[in-house]
């Protein structure tokens, strides 16, 4: 049947042209963006999966940064502990020197002064060591929690220790023991203030017993020329073979190198402090290793997730360039066929001439 009101061939060619143009546009969009999925209409399910993977990947990347920050924090704390350990080693060296019988009381005073300055530096390091404003060694934080995953329970705890001198058991006496002996001797010479000076000395020595106790009592009650003799007796008791029981220092967390006896008592406390510091450093080292392994695991997981996401949303250039060429040919052919279909209608004019 010959008609001119409806050009079915042209309509079909136009539909084919529209389809080819749409395919051509999609191929050009994918090739220009490098993505197979540029909107939900391209692959709704694939977009949902890729979005979830993207959230997980970005969360894991943030967790890896957190873990690396944790490593840096642990390294900061461990480095400061290393300096404190060196200081305690030096104080122990001074204590060993102070216990030697060839050292005079004047020499011991110098050794005690150095140890006091070093103990102050331990406190300074403990109080000033921080990471991004978070104090690490002053006891304000017993542990730091590092978020190492995308889940609420994916955490690693870094244990911290209070390393101020008193917490380590190596705090210093308010006044050196030798200085307190001198003060008691001066009070006895002046004939006033003996009770207070004696109480201060006994408190510093944690209620001594034995020869030390007897010598303190004798010095407190001495008068005139007997004061010097009583002082020498007390210093001799403190510097020669005094036992823990005689000093009572075992329960006191103080370090004093002004006498041979108190210096000897300090050695055990310094050894205990070194053990505590070593344990804290070992814990920080273990945390560093754990976090390093965590970073490696996160990196591996991110790599695999990224590869899986790529398979879903990235375009295959080889296949898409083939689709582009096909779409270009179809677009050109359908355009030509539209022209042919329109020209075919002109044949009807020959029937009415």
Image: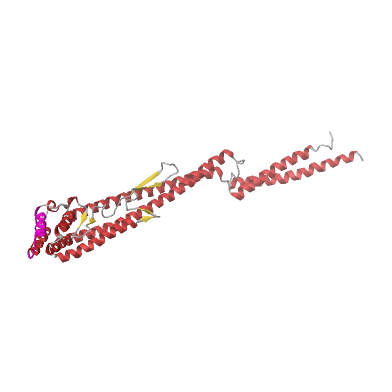
86 inside magenta stretch: no
Q: Position of residue 116 (x, y in %)?
A: 24, 61
Stretch in magenta: 210-225
Q: Is residue 48 left or right of residue 12?
A: left
Q: Can residue 20 be seen in this view?
A: yes
Q: Is residue 272 left or right of residue 302?
A: left
Q: In this view, does 302 lie to the left or right of 80?
A: right
What residue lies at 38% left-to-right and 45% top-to-bottom?
156
Q: In which quarter of the image is residue 93?
A: bottom left
User: Which residue sits furthest top?
Assistant: 1
Q: Is the stretch drawn in magenta largely helix, strand or loop?
A: helix
The C terminus: image quadrant: top right
Q: Position of residue 349 (x, y in %)?
A: 88, 41
The N terminus: image quadrant: top right
What residue lies at 17% left-to-right and 63% top-to-bottom?
108
Q: Position of residue 101 (x, y in %)?
A: 12, 62
Closer to the camera in the image, 287 or 245: 245
What residue lies at 47% left-to-right and 46% top-to-bottom?
59
């Amino acid at each position: 049947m010959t008609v001119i009101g409806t050009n079915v061939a042209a309509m079909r060619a136009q539909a084919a042209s529209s389809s080819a143009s749409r395919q051509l546009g999609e191929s050009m969009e994918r090739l220009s963006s490098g993505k197979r999925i540029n909107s939900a209409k391209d692959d709704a399910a694939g977009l949902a999966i890729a979005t979830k993977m993207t959230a997980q990947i970005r969360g894991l990347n943030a967790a890896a940064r957190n873990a690396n920050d944790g490593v840096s924090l642990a390294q900061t704390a461990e480095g400061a502990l290393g300096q404190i350990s060196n200081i305690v080693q030096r104080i122990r060296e001074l204590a060993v020197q102070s216990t030697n019988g060839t050292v005079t009381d004047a020499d011991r005073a110098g050794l005690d002064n150095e140890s006091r300055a070093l103990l102050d530096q331990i406190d300074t390091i403990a109080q000033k060591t921080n990471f991004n404003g978070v104090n690490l060694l002053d006891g304000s934080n017993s542990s730091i929690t590092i978020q190492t995953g995308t889940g609420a329970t994916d955490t690693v705890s870094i244990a911290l220790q209070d390393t101020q001198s008193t917490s380590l058991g190596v705090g210093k006496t308010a006044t050196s023991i030798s200085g307190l002996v001198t003060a008691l001797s001066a009070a006895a010479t002046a004939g006033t203030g003996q009770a207070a000076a004696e109480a201060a000395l006994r408190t510093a020595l944690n209620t001594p017993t034995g020869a030390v106790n007897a010598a303190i009592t004798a010095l407190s009650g001495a008068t005139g020329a007997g004061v010097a003799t009583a002082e020498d007796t007390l210093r001799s008791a403190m510097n020669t073979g005094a036992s823990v029981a005689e000093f009572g220092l075992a329960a006191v967390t103080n370090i004093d190198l002004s006498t041979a006896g108190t210096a000897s008592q300090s050695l055990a406390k310094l050894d205990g402090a070194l053990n505590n510091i070593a344990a804290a450093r070992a814990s920080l080292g273990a945390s560093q290793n754990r976090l390093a392994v965590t970073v490696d695991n996160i990196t591996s997981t991110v790599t695999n997730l990224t590869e899986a996401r790529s398979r879903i949303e990235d375009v295959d250039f080889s296949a898409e360039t083939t689709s582009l060429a096909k779409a270009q040919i179809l677009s050109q052919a359908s355009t030509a066929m539209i022209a042919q279909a329109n020209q075919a209608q002109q044949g009807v004019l020959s029937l009415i001439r």
